[in-house]
Amino acid sequence: MKQRKKRRNNLPGLAVSVRDNNVEKALSIFKQKVKNSGLMLEIKRRSFYEKPSRKRRHIKNLAKLRAKHQKDLD
């Protein structure tokens, strides 16, 4: 049986190529890439000013959560 080579996108960033004029498929792939990259969460987070002390507190709380879940897995 002949194996098909998987094509790699050499496009920078979150670009998607349209094949066979199938724009709907390309759009769904683009939406999936945006969702997986966390871009929308980053834009939402940066949409308002956050004090440096709140940033540090948030990072510290995330570290506590990671440690808690890591402990549960061990």
Image: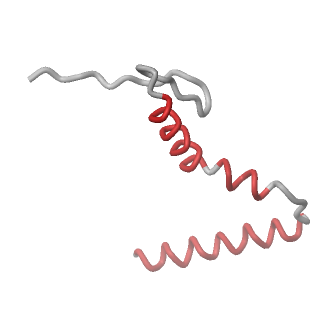
Give the percent coordinates (x, y) of residue 9.
Answer: 47, 24
Q: Of 34 and 25, which appears nearest the observer?
A: 25
Q: Quadrant of residue 34?
A: top right
Count of numbered badges drawn on the protein: 0
Give the percent coordinates (x, y) of residue 19.
Answer: 43, 21
Identify whether 62 is placed above or below 39.
below
Q: Quadrant of residue 67?
A: bottom right
Q: How is the image coloured?
A: secondary structure
Question: What's the residue at 44%, 79% (across, down)?
Answer: 72
Identify whether 47 is placed above or below 23.
below
Identify whether 12 is placed above or below 51.
above
Question: What's the residue at 51%, 45% (across, down)?
Answer: 32
Quarter occupied by the C terminus: bottom left
Q: Of 17 and 49, which appears nearest the observer?
A: 17
8 horizontally vs 12: left or right: left
Q: Of 42 and 70, which appears nearest the observer?
A: 42
Hey, which residue is sitting farthest left in the picture? 1
Give the percent coordinates (x, y) of residue 16.
Answer: 53, 28
Q: Of 6 and 18, which appears nearest the observer?
A: 18
56 horizontally vs 6: left or right: right
Question: What's the residue at 54%, 49% (across, down)?
Answer: 36
Question: What's the residue at 48%, 35% (across, down)?
Answer: 24
Quarter occupied by the N terminus: top left
Identify whether 12 is placed above or below 48.
above
